[in-house]
Amino acid sequence: MRVLEVSDLVTGFPAGRERIHVIDGVSLYLEAGETLALVGESGCGKSMTALSILRLVPRPGRVEAGKVLLEGRDLLSLAVPDMRNVRGAEISMIFQEPMTSLNPVARVGKQVVEAIRLHEKVGVPAARERTLELFRRAGIPDAEARLDAYPHQLSGGLKQRVMIAMALATRPKVLIADEPTTALDVTIQAQILELLRELKRDFGTAILLITHDIGVVNELADRVAVMYGGRVVEEGDRSQVLGEPAHPYTQGLLRSMPGFATAHERLAEIPGVVPPPAEWPAGCRFDTRCERVLGHCRSEAPAATPVGEGHRVFCHAVASEIGEAP
Amino acid sequence: MSEALLEVSGLRTWFPIRKGVFRSVVGHVRAVDGVDLTVRAGETLALVGESGCGKTTVGRTILGLEPAREGAVRFEGVDLAALAPAELRPYRKEVQIVFQDPMASLDPRMRVREIVAEGMRSFGLGKNEAERTERVAEQLRRVRLDPDAMDRYPHEFSGGQRQRIGIARALAVEPRLLICDEAVSALDVSIQAQILNLLSELQEELGLAYLFITHDLSVVRYLAHEVAVMYLGQIVEHGPTEQIFEDPRHPYTRGLLAAVPSVDPARRSAEPVVLGDVPSPASPPDGCRFHTRCPEVFDRCSREMPEVAVRGDRGCRCFLPRATEA
């Protein structure tokens, strides 16, 4: 069953008289209990997709078209108070920087208690009991004492554990994790990834994982959607996208990772830079940096080409290759 | 193996902790606490560690930006700490630094021309303005930027291009050693590959030596000839790159390598090996600094500090280093 289904999402910002669509026709779905990784480099629109789902796009930007269905209910047409009840209760989010997402002048236990009591009719002692249970579940050592700690008294890894406990306190259907381990050291990152794997198994929460790190994708995701220039360019199972990438951008991205290169061998580069949204090409967005560019790449946006069971690619070159084959 | 260009021995850099009305010193943050390392001419030494281990402070102390409490920094055998400021000046030209954040390390109100020429002017390189302009153009070509870029401001460039400007600035005074402090950590992977390739080309062209300070182990394998792993102010293991990766002997090195997420879709990493958080460098644990997180700890570790046992070109600070498997 699909818990979350995003279709043809368009989010735009005004630029002079025109509007720039930083999200341009993104469609995604999330099955119950699965983890979908949304991967891409800075500015590709992955975080903006998450903010659009939660209707938190900063002004003057706004969602202009599309549907966001949470168990069949369109979030984009909900009244504001109803949407407020969705956020934090049915869809929770954890952010990259746990320091800036916790209130520095409130004890962390109280912040989680507050989050629970905002969405459910429970007394403080019961909510506190549940928070303690969540802290233990999130692997916070000496959990009872930590309830009364202030954020600055906790390390980065512990703060992220508090954030995860808070996000799961209301048993959400969907957890959006935006670069949850990017600010952490590798040994701490490994601990948090292990925690997320355990929670996924025990709580069955569907996770939309936003990251630029292919390693994190590989550790956590069931399916992967690769974004470039406000669009999804490739989508499929983890093993398909990472093992048999079909889009020239995905291929370039994987080849340029130092982890794939052996010592002192030249790394594969993707030439050029990501153009700013105002200069995005009219056709395929990757057109300016692609080595397999064809005549109509510049003018026409590519449609989805299936290359395997549930594996789709948006590329003219791949489409023509498959079209030519019998 | 080429000769030693820079030798650091017994380096200690401590920061005082002051308290009370009289700002009396109540303790020290032992950021660097007895570090030995050698950078060879034309080669790359990677200094690897997690946040707060003191790797950046090592770089800053070598540059003379922090005073050393103890120990020596020798450039071609000359102890820099023993020199008077005037005698030190020629050596400042020999060692340059490239910082992590190219936005914060370039003056937004200076044109690229001024940024690159500032060091030349300070060291009296180039007889007149015309000659300096020619040299700026040469540096920009060297980092694969169009010399026309010299009349523009930093904000007009992308992150990768700004990092190229930072490298051009450092190279402008013809140093022999470049300290790269997380120089590619803020860049997207496809851009990171471009900069890493550039650094390795420059090393070949100019015979530069690099002290490459980073937390990212995957980058190290590609670039470094030798690796030194740092934990809480000390080097815990050092040796030739391939040996460190293939046969890590210190439990911390092994944990660090195990914590790097796998990018191979056929393989996911096992459970985290190193648990808990890094202790504070203001009150490092007695005995081995790593014993509070070590999976192989035994009673001696909490009482005695192991010395670095050197065997051949490798060294390891552990009572129970894993023996080389035959």
Image (cartoon, rainbow, N blue to C red):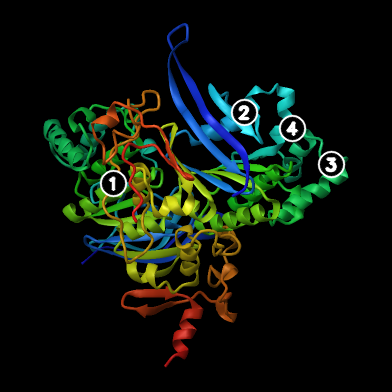
Mark 1 lies on residue = B273
On the picture, is B207 further left or further right than A28? Answer: right
Q: Earlier in the sequence, mark 2 or mark 4?
A: 2
* Three-letter residue code for mark 4: Pro
Chain letter of the residue beneath label 1 in the structure image: B
Residue A95 in the image: x percent, y percent? 36, 45
* Three-letter residue code for mark 3: Gly
Q: In this orientation, does residue B12 appear?
A: yes
Question: Is label 2 in a helix, a strand or a loop?
Answer: loop
Chain letter of the residue beneath label 2 in the structure image: B
* Three-letter residue code for mark 2: Gly
Q: Quadrant of the C terminus of chain B?
A: bottom left
Question: Is label 4 in a helix, a strand or a loop?
Answer: helix
User: What is the crowding at mark 4: few (fewer than 14 residues within 10 Å), some, or many (at least 20)?
Assistant: few
Question: Is label 1 in a helix, a strand or a loop?
Answer: loop
Mark 4 lies on residue = B90
Between A191 and A17, which is closer to the camera in this rendering?
A191
Residue A32 in the image: x percent, y percent? 22, 62
User: What is the crowding at mark 3: few (fewer than 14 residues within 10 Å), some, or many (at least 20)?
Assistant: some
Labels 1 and 2 share a subunit: yes
From this view, report whether residue B160 is shown above or below residue B252: below
* Three-letter residue code for mark 1: Val
Between B287 and A37, which is closer to the camera in this rendering?
B287
Mark 3 lies on residue = B126
Instruction: Give the distance between the C-alpha atoms of the residues marked 2 and 3, in whole angstroms.
Output: 26 Å
